[in-house]
Amino acid sequence: MYKFFLFLCFPLLIFSQKKIEGTVLNTRQEKLPRIAVEVYDSQNKLLKTIITDDHGNFILEGFSGQPVKIVVNDLEYARFEHYFDPEQQDRPLIVVLRKDTRDIQEVVMTKPKPLVKRKIDRLEFNVENSNITSLNVWEILKKTPGVTANNDVLAIKGSTSILVTINDKKVMLTGDELKNFLENIQGEELKSVEVITNPPAKYEASGSAVLNIVMKKNNVEGYRGIISSKYIQSRYAKGMGGITQYYRKNKLSVMGSYNLNSGTYYREGTDHVYYVEDQTRWISTMNRKDRNKSQNTLNFNAEYEADSLTNIRLNYSGYFSPKSYGIYNVPTLIYNGQNIAESDYTTVNDHHSRSVNNILSLQADRKINKKSQLTWTNYFAGNNFRKYQNVLTYLNFINQPPGVNNFLTENKNNVQLYSTQVDYQWKNENWELESGSKYSFVKTSSQLGFSDNENGELQYRPEKSNTFDYKEHNFALYASLAYSPGKWNFKAGLRTEKTDLEGLVSEPYEVNRNQYWKLFPTLFVQYTTDNNHQFGLSYGKRISRPPYSSLNPAKSYYNLFSYYQGDPGLKAAIIHNLNFTYTWKEWNLDLYYRKEIDPSMEISYQDPDTNNLIYHYTNIEKEEAYGLSLYKNLLIKPWWNISLSENLEHLENYFIGVDQLLYKNKVWNLFSDISTAFILDKGNDWKLEIGHRYYSPSIQGTFRISGSSSTYLVMNRKFFSKKLEASLLFNDIFKTSGEKVSTKYANQDNYFLDYRDTRSFTLSLKFNFGNQSVKNAKPIKKVEEQERM
């Protein structure tokens, strides 16, 4: 009978347990998510660890009848301890974390490695104040979990269809221009890198993933700055000099930086083409040497607090390369079926190019009340590119008299993008609502002028010249809702985008118009256990629109027998992403599946009738991939840690070959980055890191790409009360980063060997001047506008 009585009373006993709510804040009254709150008994025995939710809240229950102590020991803040009796606690607990002044006498704090945080919709790689800020942003991205930069192409979990943003603003550069731009941004300007494999509805739907680079805010009163210089020795020398300046006073904060790069860039390769029809082999050796005396990168950020409810931010980024030039001398030997070189030709390519890229954004934030905020963002980006080349070919074919061919091409590309976006955010303790709209307009203009030699005179050829104009209007609406009841976190969103595009080709005349509506749902679920085990599941649908330059069908000639060609009829790819994540004590696992329908990419094919090797940007049928990604930072000793970043993937590409048959290209590939770091002298921040990256063989459309690897060593130390920092970087020490990219099916049999001159030695020097102390930073006080909220 008593068991039945206890059974009836058991729910009452459970609900009679006293619950104590609490909130973790910093001194700016900002609520801190994902903070571990440890609960100890009177004997200092750990009873439980509770993780604050996305709004900094936590709940204590089940501790009645005994005094307890709560402890917060976060890396970014001073240790917090508080004793209390749960029976006598009748108000919510307010935990205010303060910066440890002993650790922040200098702007640059000492931490052995960056901190990785798993949020419900992204992985945050916090590099601020870490030992890798001595590197540039490009090198930091290569060390970011889940990101690879094989062959100077960024990828996230094997997918190269990604959107790169800076402070959530789109960067319109790709390829070598993107690499050069990011190399000219110094690591000390960087706060974190966000790897967003399933971007929420707030982000535009373009790309399979988003790589968001978050720049620092200036929180130090007064004026300070950094002077930096760099010397790079690979095959040829390169150098960099720059200055970054910060100023903050009352409501105004300003940051400006300028970097100048100069040097010679080298790349070597060999093309092999076998024509089964006549059993000849064409082998071309190309050693490319380009000189660039002036690569200029300018960044400017200004933030003004109009009042305590209104913030205005102005951002500008510019990249200007007035002239890159070089002369390529490319010999080609043609072997017959008996492996005898019976013909040859030599190409001399004299060229120069100019590139200008500007990004300007203006953002205004307005707090409506304590729970809601409105943001208006305007964004403009422009990219202007010019390239001129004079190609001279000396021909010496069997059974033909020697001859000379000469042609000139001039490419002009201009891209302009404007967008305006309004975002509304409302949140309370458990719920968060985001909604907004965006309009963007893109206009591109590409002109190709072609002239060749006839009877000793250069003649303009309108039939080989081309003008391509492209316009795209995009209108988007989105809404997302997040709910965080405690251990569980939920977030769901829906974005719809209407695209209206028009492409006009002059030669041959063609007009391509298209309109479409697409829906892009996203869903996120996350669960955190009492022992801080974190599980996540997410799904997102995305779209990958082809690069604007790849829509131009004009033939861009490398030499007399090879050219690149785009396609104005390219289709946008639809991408489905599914991710399962697990996080515990800096173990980060990500099991993923990705399917792309009509992905676009560059492939090559050979034409036996003209002996042309053609690089064509086109759609393939589909791509499927599934894999497992792992990141772990192991602290062996206080002065020694090991970092592991691994990605194992099965990848399949389906494409229609030149014989109109469906082919399947598949591979298991592995990316591995293992590094170990040592603190040689804590007092002088003297650190050493050695690492090794390995890329197993992979595929891209028709291509099969051989494996490659790279071993690196980086060491940095600070002098003169940490005002001077010196860094040494040895990259690709054993020169093992070269690749073989091959195509072999039907009558296609070609490959090229590629090495990008990555073995290098870099010496960097940085000097900090001005006010480097944050001890005098003023706290933010509530003023009249906030009091009325």
Image (cartoon, grey):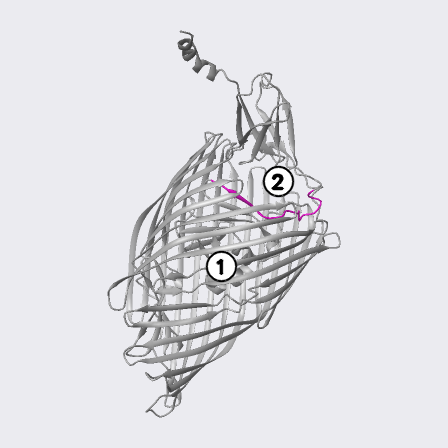
Q: Which residue is drawn at 32% across and 79% down?
A: 611
Residue found farthest to the right? 720
Q: Nearer the viewer, residue 302 or 409?
A: 409
Q: Which of 306 and 703 is in front in this view?
A: 703
Residue 3 lies in magenta, yes or no? no
Mark 1 and mark 2 residues within 8 Å of each other at the beta carbon: no
Mark 2 lies on a secondary structure that is loop
- Above or below 763: residue 426: above
Residue 110 lies in magenta, yes or no? yes
- Above or below 627: residue 728: below
Identified by mark 2, the residue type is Leu
Residue found farthest to the top? 1
Is 131 on the left-hand or right-hand side of 330?
Answer: right
Point out the tag, 1 or 2, that comes first from the N-terminus. 2
Residue 535, position as x, y percentages in the image: 44, 38
- Above or below 51: residue 746: below
Q: Specify the segment rendered in magenta.
A: 103-119
Q: Which of the two marks, 1 or 2, is nearer to us in this view?
A: 1
Residue 742, position as x, y percentages in the image: 38, 68
Residue found farthest to the left? 660
Identified by mark 1, the residue type is Tyr
The Cα atoms of the two marked residues, 1 and 2, are separated by 32 Å
Is 462 on the left-hand or right-hand side of 80?
Answer: left
Is 116 on the left-hand or right-hand side of 707?
Answer: right
- Above or below 469: residue 2: above
Mark 1 burial class by Cα count in 10 Å: few <14, some 14-19, many 20+: some
Residue 132, position as x, y percentages in the image: 60, 53
Q: Name the residue under label 1.
A: 694
Q: Does residue 215 appear in this view?
A: no
Q: Name the residue under label 2.
A: 75
